[in-house]
């Protein structure tokens, strides 16, 4: 998914420039820091976070004597990546699960933040993991709210408790809890009413509901489009009800990044999940390290493969993962991957997860034709070429371009993308400390 395209593009341009340098001077570093600062401020990131982030990058860059090292550009990109990861929360923060067997998640948020949609998405995600969720709407101010949730619940075949005659939200919540236990469910997701502003009455009602069902997680649903204003909203909610974390929605839209990059550092609370679209399956666990890589255009091959593993041919995807780990990922694998992922979502989402894929596709509506072109390029190669792309010299590339009805540039671009993917995976396996499985299992792919 292309996230924060404006910020992402700028940071990619900055890091691309510095990555390619064989020698880096103090001046280069200073210039880079200034550009990064500007890009962050333009993306509406809170100034305190901008300050922290640039300070961290500068200190790291100076401390490591980058200037004297052999691959200064790459080291700097890694430092920027690490600093972004840290600002985003460091590592994944899992949803709490009640050890007594019944868990309650309560979703708060301003009007239109995405609470109801997210409640249903979360139920779907839990159901996929083999859990038994039940939904309830405690919005007593807008009767249509309960209908909206119920329709969504039916579409994913999850029970939903509503009582449109009851005017007290806390009593509905109590009833829903009882119903959930009676139905042998293990998780209650409470969708609350939204307001345009935070007021005492709303907070009192929310507190009463929390008192009634004693939530294991109090999650604020934050619309990423509101930028750093999210920090104020979060602090207000936290003051009244004490939050455990956030679910950030609409990261797929043209959110600038301010909300996601500011909220963790400014509130100390983690982002747990992110909404990546309106569809029921577009809720993802938030991985700070992967998000940082996506922003820097280093791709997110791990999520891509995981998505494939979840939704299509599990055995095949697992094989691909193993090949990636062993560095045997060929163009033939890439073709198979394309074919598998084609069913998963839009081409644009998929390309953005390949290194260097996001920037290239900026603004362009990518349709299935783009996929077909890429697939056609690989199909125009012989099996030997697919399995050993090193032999793709100029004349072979020319033949492939004409065979696939594309241009040499397009062929080159595809090969470059393939090489970047491979390089990235090499870095991953190089970084792994715990033997072969290290890095990938760190991403939750232990098998
Ligand atoms: N693109 C995109 N749209 C989203 C996402 N999450 C929610 N939406 C859309 O945001 C709109 C509002 O979502 P709701 O779930 O109704 O929001 P709400 O917080 O329950 O709203 P109220 O109950 O009125 O306060 C809907 O059109 C959703 O489809 C997301 O991750 N991406
Ligand atoms: Mg709602």
Image (cartoon, grey):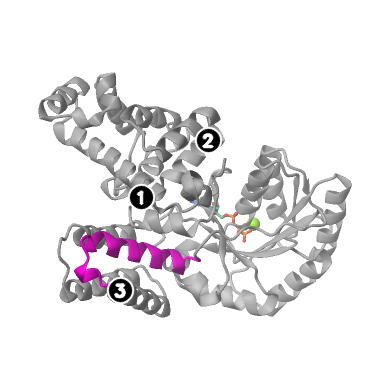
For marks 2 and 1, give the CA distance. Answer: 22 Å
Which quadrant of the frame does ligand 1 lie within?
A: bottom right
Establish whether ligand 1 lies closer than 8 Å to the Cβ of label 2: no
Up-down: is 127 above or below 70?
Answer: above
Quadrant into which the C terminus falls: top right
The residue pinned by badge 3 equals 37
Mark 2 against mark 3, which lies toward the viewer? Answer: 2
Q: Earlier in the sequence, mark 2 or mark 1?
A: 2
Q: Secondary structure at mark 1?
A: helix
The residue pinned by badge 1 equals 427
Question: In this view of the protein, which residue sits in the foreground, 37 or 94?
Answer: 94
The residue shown at (56%, 44%) is: 446
For marks 2 and 3, give the CA distance. Answer: 38 Å
* Residue 80 visible somewhere in the drawing: yes
Mark 2 against mark 1, which lies toward the viewer? Answer: 1
Q: Secondary structure at mark 3?
A: helix
Up-down: is 401 above or below 103?
Answer: above
The residue pinned by badge 2 equals 309
| Bounds of the magenta segment | 65-89
Q: Quadrant of residue 402?
A: top left
The circle drawn on residue 266 is: none
Q: Residue 256, position in %: x, y?
A: 39, 63
Mark 1 against mark 3, which lies toward the viewer? Answer: 1
Residue 122 lies left or right of residue 311; in this view the side is: right
Q: Secondary structure at mark 2?
A: helix
Tag 2–tag 3 contact (CB < 8 Å) = no
Q: Residue 101, position in %: x, y?
A: 81, 53
Magenta segment: does it hold 35?
no
Q: Residue 85, position in %: x, y?
A: 43, 63
The residue shown at (31%, 30%) is: 331
């Amino acid at each position: 998914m292309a996230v924060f395209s404006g910020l992402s593009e700028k940071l990619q341009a900055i890091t691309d420039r510095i990555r390619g340098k064989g020698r880096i001077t103090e001046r280069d570093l200073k210039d880079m820091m200034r550009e990064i600062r500007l890009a962050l401020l333009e993306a509406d990131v809170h100034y305190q976070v901008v300050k922290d982030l640039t300070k961290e990058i500068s200190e790291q860059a100076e401390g490591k004597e980058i200037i004297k090292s052999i691959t200064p550009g790459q080291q700097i990109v890694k430092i920027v990546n690490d600093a972004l990861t840290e600002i985003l929360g460091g590592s994944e923060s899992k949803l709490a699960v009640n050890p007594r067997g019944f868990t309650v998640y309560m979703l708060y948020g301003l009007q239109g933040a995405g609470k109801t949609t997210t409640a249903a998405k979360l139920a779907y995600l839990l159901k996929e993991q083999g859990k038994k969720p039940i939904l309830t709407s405690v919005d007593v101010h807008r009767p249509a709210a309960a209908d909206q949730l119920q329709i969504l619940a039916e579409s994913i075949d999850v029970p939903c408790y509503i009582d449109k005659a009851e005017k007290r939200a806390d009593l509905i919540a109590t009833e829903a809890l009882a119903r959930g236990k009676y139905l042998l469910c293990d998780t209650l997701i409470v969708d609350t009413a939204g307001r345009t502003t935070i007021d005492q009455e709303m907070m009192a009602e929310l507190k009463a509901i929390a008192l009634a069902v004693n939530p294991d997680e109090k999650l604020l649903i934050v619309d990423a489009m509101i930028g750093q204003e999210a920090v104020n909203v979060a602090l207000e909610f936290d003051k009244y009800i004490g939050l455990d974390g956030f679910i950030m929605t609409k990261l797929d839209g043209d959110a600038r990044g301010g909300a996601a990059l500011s909220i963790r550092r400014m509130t100390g609370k983690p982002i747990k999940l992110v909404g990546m679209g309106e569809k029921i399956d577009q809720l993802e666990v938030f991985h700070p390290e992967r998000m940082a890589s996506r922003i820097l255009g280093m791709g997110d091959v791990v999520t891509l493969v995981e998505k494939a593993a979840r939704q299509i041919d599990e055995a095949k995807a697992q094989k691909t993962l193993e090949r990636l780990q062993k560095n045997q990922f060929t163009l033939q694998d890439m073709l198979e991957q394309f074919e598998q992922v084609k069913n998963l979502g839009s081409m644009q989402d998929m390309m953005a997860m390949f290194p260097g894929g996001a920037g290239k596709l900026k603004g362009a509506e990518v349709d299935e034709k783009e996929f077909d072109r890429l697939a056609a390029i690989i199909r125009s190669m012989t099996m030997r070429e697919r399995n050993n792309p090193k032999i793709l010299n100029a004349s072979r590339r020319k033949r492939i371009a004409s065979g696939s009805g594309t241009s040499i540039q397009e062929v080159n671009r595809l090969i470059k993308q393939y090489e970047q993917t491979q390089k990235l995976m090499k870095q991953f396996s190089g970084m792994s400390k715990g033997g072969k499985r290290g890095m990938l299992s760190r991403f939750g792919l232990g098998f």
